[in-house]
Image (cartoon, coloured by chain):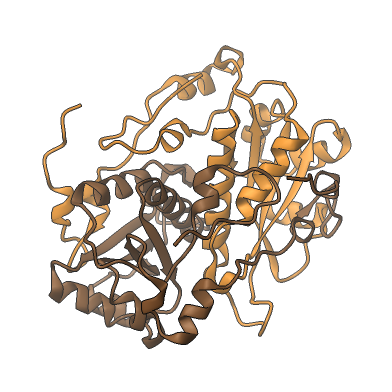
Chain colours: A brown, B orange
Amino acid sequence: MDKPAQAQYPIHDLLQKRWSPRAFSERPVEADKLRILFEAARWAPSSFNEQPWSFIVATKDDQANFDRLLQCLLEGNRAWARHAPVLMLSVAKLRFEEDGEPNRHAFHDVGLAVENLVIQATALGLMVHQMAGFDVRKARETFEIPDGYEPVAALAIGYPGDPARLPDRLRERELGPRRRKPLQDSVFAGRWGLVSPLVTEPTPSH
Amino acid sequence: MDKPAQAQYPIHDLLQKRWSPRAFSERPVEADKLRILFEAARWAPSSFNEQPWSFIVATKDDQANFDRLLQCLLEGNRAWARHAPVLMLSVAKLRFEEDGEPNRHAFHDVGLAVENLVIQATALGLMVHQMAGFDVRKARETFEIPDGYEPVAALAIGYPGDPARLPDRLRERELGPRRRKPLQDSVFAGRWGLVSPLVTEPTPSH
C-alpha cells in the first residue's frame, strides 16, 4: 500500500514514499538487501565521526532470536510486528570512545544513521516501522547490552503487506491520513517563535 | 568537490554522495530550495508523531541574524562556516505536547528529521555540514529558546565550494579519505558483540 506524503513542496520521491506501515508481507528480506541497509546507516554523518550506532538484528529464519526480540516489544506492537520478517534494535553508545566523555549527540546520531537506513529501505521497496514501545530493560537483559550503551528503538522491516489483515483499529490507522504540523510551527528566524519569511509565502499550487 | 562513500555494498546514490564539506560556495541558496529542505524534514517519522524538531534559520542576505548565529559557533567552525550562505540551528522539544512527559526520543527524532533534510539537500545539489561545536547556552540566549527546548546542532548549508580556499589544516581534512568502522563492529545478532552472519560474508567484488 502506498501512502505518499501530501507534501506542500516537491520533496524527493524516496522521502515522499517513506512511511511507517503496520502491515508487512511475510516475504523474507534478501540478505543482500539487509547488508545494503546497514551499509547505508554506516555512511551517515556523526559528531566527531563517532558513529555511536549499533544494531541487533533478528530475521524470522532464526526463529528463536526473532521471538526473543519480539518479546521485548510492548504487546500492542507485538500484535502486528510479529508478521514482519525482520526485527531490529538500534543501540546508542553514550560516551565517546576516545575520552569517555558523554556524547550529547548519541541518540541524535543514531537517528541520522537510522534515517539513512530507512530511506535506503524505501529505495529497495522495503518499509520500516520504528517503535518506541518496547521494554528497554528487558532488551538490555535479553541481548546483554552493556553499561554505556542504550537500546534506542525497535524496528520492524519488510515488504509492504495487506492492510486488510490488520485488526480493525490498526487497519483504520493504516488507512487514515498522514498528519504533520505546518512549517510555520517549526521554522523560525531571528528569535524563537518568529516564523521565517521563507515559510510564510503562500503555498504553491500543484 | 565530490567525495563519494567507498561503500562496500551498493547504497543509494544520494547516500553515497552525501558528505560534510567545509568548503562552501558563496552562491546563495534559492528560497524555493530551502523550503523543500524544511518540507523534507517535516515528513520524517517520529515517536508518537510528536515531530519534536524545530529550526532557526539565518541566510546571509539577513546579515545581522546570520552574524548572531555565526557568533554562537565555536571559533574553529566560524572560520569556515562564515562562508556558507545559510546557517541553522536544530532544536529539540524535550517533552511530549500531550502530557508533558519526557520524550526519550527527542534528540533521536531530530536526527531522523535532519537526515531527511540532508538527503534532500544532496538531491538539490546542496551540501550540509552539521556541527556539535557551538555554544548551547549562547544559542539559547541569543535566540530566546525557551525552557523545555534544547538547541541540538548547528548546520551550515550551501553549494559546494573550492577546497583550495580553506586554511591548510582544514584543506587536508577536506581532501583526506572518509573513514567508517567496519560493519562487523556494529551489527550483532543473538546477543551484544556477536557479529551477525549477515555481515560476516566476504565483501563482494565490484
**Residue lying farthest to the top in this orientation:** B164
Residue B132 appears in the figure:
no
Please give left or right for residue B98 compared with residue A110 in the image: right
At 16% from the left and 36% from the top, the residue drawn is B203
Q: In which quarter of the image is residue A83?
A: bottom left
Point out the image quarter for the N terminus of chain A. bottom left
Q: Position of residue A10 (x, y in %)?
A: 65, 43
The residue closer to the viewer here, A167 or B29, is A167
Residue A89: image x %, image y %? 33, 67
Q: Which residue lies furthest to the front in this view?
A: A164
Q: Which residue is drawn at 52% across and 33% down?
A: B20
- Percent coordinates x, y for residue A204 in the rendering: 79, 44
Q: Which of A17 and A87 is in front in this view?
A: A17
Q: Looking at the image, is B105 positioned above or below residue A106?
A: below
Q: Where is residue B50 in the image (x, y as percent from the top left)?
A: 62, 70
Above or below residue B103? Residue A120 is above
Left or right: residue B98 versus residue A125 is: right
Q: Is residue B153 left or right of residue A188?
A: left
Place residue B86 in its image quadrant.
top right
Number of marks in the image? 0
Residue under the image location 71 percent in, 51 percent down? A8
Position of the C terminus of chain A by quadrant: top right
Please determine whether, in this image, residue B143 is positioned above or below residue B10: below
Q: In which quarter of the image is residue A148?
A: bottom left
Q: Where A187 falls versus A175 (above or below)?
A: above
Write the residue at 69% across / 77% down: B97
